[in-house]
Amino acid sequence: RMALSYREAVDLLVSLAVVEQMNSPILMANLAPVRRKIMASFSPTDRHRVQKLKSRILIGRMASVDVQGNYTPPQSGIVERFHEAFLLMKVAEIDYRDDKGVRTRRRIEPHFLLLNYPIWYALCWDHLRQDIRTFRCDRMRSVALVEETFRMRPYADFKAALADPAAGEV
């Protein structure tokens, strides 16, 4: 027997969804029964919330060698706070370093996450630019949650950023 908190179960389900979407054939035969058992432990309302959350996490292609060359895994504290902002749909203030090393402070609404392995991109509404922007999660230098929550913007607003995350990258 194992008792998982709602958040732990959601993290596990999302991780399973990511692995399933990557279509890895090795050691993945029992994922579907595991997912079903975890989902069965949720109320119908929570199952719906988890499905909506999973729809906000997208799997793309493998990051190019050039992009991987300047990747550094983000610090765990930053990841945890950003994760909370994404999960709870809270506005976050981030200190961000772009590809040229320029640092800016941004207020963002993290609507979608896109994995171009191993790089995670946050597709966000940027309050500074009043537009959709893409932020590489490994370039976030700090994350602070704001009590303000946000409502999901239409998926169509993010289509261009999803087609080419680097095009809208700050």
Image (tube, rainbow, N blue to C red):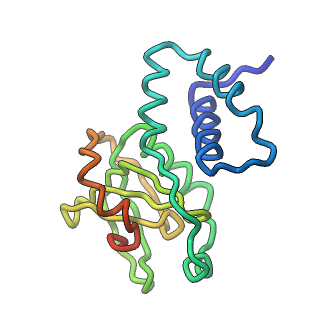
Q: Is residue 31 above or below residue 92?
A: above
Question: Can you give x and y, in whole percent of width and height, for residue 132 in the image?
Answer: 26, 60
On screen, residue 29 versus residue 21, left or right, reads right
Q: Residue at x 21, y 66 (%)?
A: 129
Q: Is residue 65 above or below residue 42?
A: below
Question: Can you give x and y, in whole percent of width and height, for residue 43 in the image?
Answer: 51, 13
Q: Residue at x 67, y 24 (%)?
A: 4
On screen, residue 108 versus residue 35, left or right, reads left
Q: Which residue lies furthest to the bottom in this view?
A: 100
Quadrant showing the N terminus: top right
On screen, residue 110 versus residue 47, left or right, reads left
Q: Which residue is drawn at 44% across and 75% down?
A: 97
On the image, which quarter does residue 40 sit in?
A: top right
Question: Can you give x and y, in whole percent of width and height, for residue 164 in the image?
Answer: 38, 68
On screen, residue 22 versus residue 160, left or right, reads right
Q: Is residue 122 above or below residue 152?
A: below
Q: Is residue 136 above or below residue 43?
A: below
Which of the pair 121/75 is nearer the observer? Answer: 121
Quadrant showing the C terminus: bottom left
Which of the pair 76/20 is nearer the observer? Answer: 20
Question: Can you give x and y, in whole percent of width and height, for residue 47 in the image?
Answer: 49, 21
On the image, which quarter does residue 95 sit in?
A: bottom left
Q: Which residue is drawn at 61% across and 15% down?
A: 41
